Structure formats: structure tokens, C-alpha cells
Image: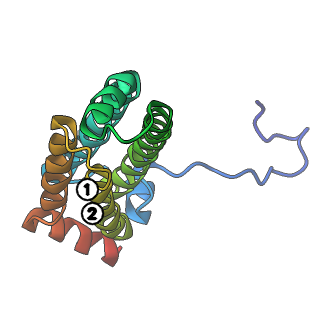
Amino acid sequence: MSTPDESDPAPRDEPVMPTAAEAADSGHARTDAPRVVRVAFWVWVSAGLIGLIGSILFFILREEWAENQKRVTPEMKSVDVMQVAVGLSWWLLLGSLMFLGLFLLLAHHARRGARKARTLLLVVGVIACLFEYSFGRVTIYGLISALLVIVGLGMLYMPTARRFFAESDER
């Protein structure tokens, strides 16, 4: 690294990193989220992780589920029940991974003050709750995950959070 002197005929036009105050003023480095928004981020992460844990357990125990289904519906062939169990376990696992990724991404952007992320979390949260119950697979993990989604949504629409998102639109 050199300083401009007589040997360097013209100063370089290199980009200069903004100071912390300049970045905060421009809205790029928002770290002033209220506590309720910061906690809501971790609630969303927990909802996604618990949903993923439930789907992993279903994936591991799919043979047991197939045996129970075979007892309930004896007219179905064992091969058909096992194919449904395998397909359902993969569907649940991939869906849970997708929802965890969406929750992480959108909750992170909401924590930074993006109002669109809060709205998208509302839509994705409703779809995730429906996903938990659409297959008739109501488990304790699905119930806890859905409850955490509802709590996370409620936290993002509390008065302090609404003021935070309204201020981020003004900047």
C-alpha cells in the first residue's frame, strides 16, 4: 500500500468503505431491531428446526408407520403401503428443509427491517401450517412447529414491531 507522493502522478479512484454511521444512515446495516423482532427470528428458526426434526423421525420410522397403516387398512397390499411411506417420508423431509430455509431467509430479512419479508413470512407460515396437517400426520412436532409459527407471526405484528417496520419504510 502506498501513499500518493511525487512518484505516483495521480491519486487512485478506489472505492472507499463507508463508515458505520454512513451505513446505518443508508439503511444497509440496520442493527436497531427491537427485542421482539430479534426474538421472533429465533422463534422462526425453532419452528423450522422442530418441523425438520419431526420429518427426520418420520423418515427413520417409516416402516413402523407402514405396518400401522397395513393394520388399519388390511385391503391394501404391503408393497403399496411401503411405497406410500417412502414417498411421503421424502416429501416431508424435503418440504421441511425448504420451509426451514425460507424461515431462515425471510426472518433474517425481517430482522433487518424488510417489510416485504414480514408479509412473506405470513404467507409462508400459513402454508407451512397447512403442510404440517395436509397429510394427516398430526404429531407433537407438527403441533409445536405450527404453534411457534403462530407465535412468530404474532411477534412480528406487535406494536413495537409495527413501528420498527414503519420506520424502515421511511428510510
The amino acid pointed to by label 2 is Val
User: Which residue occupies the foreground of this view, 163 or 106?
Assistant: 106
Please give the residue where the numbered disc 2 appears in the rendered image.
126
Question: What quarter of the picture does the N terminus occupy?
Answer: top right
Residue lying farthest front? 75
Estimate the x, y position of residue 117 in percent, counting from the top left: 37, 64
16 lies above or below 141: below
Q: Which residue is mark 1?
A: 129
Q: Quadrant of residue 92?
A: top left
Q: Looking at the image, which is closer to me, 128 or 100?
A: 128
Tell me the element at label 2. Answer: helix
Q: Position of residue 126 (x, y in %)?
A: 27, 63
Kind of element beneath mark 1:
helix
Whether residue 39 is visible? no
Near mark 1 (Cα within 10 A), the count class, few <14, some 14-19 or many ≥20, is: some
Comparing 97 with 66, the one in front is: 66
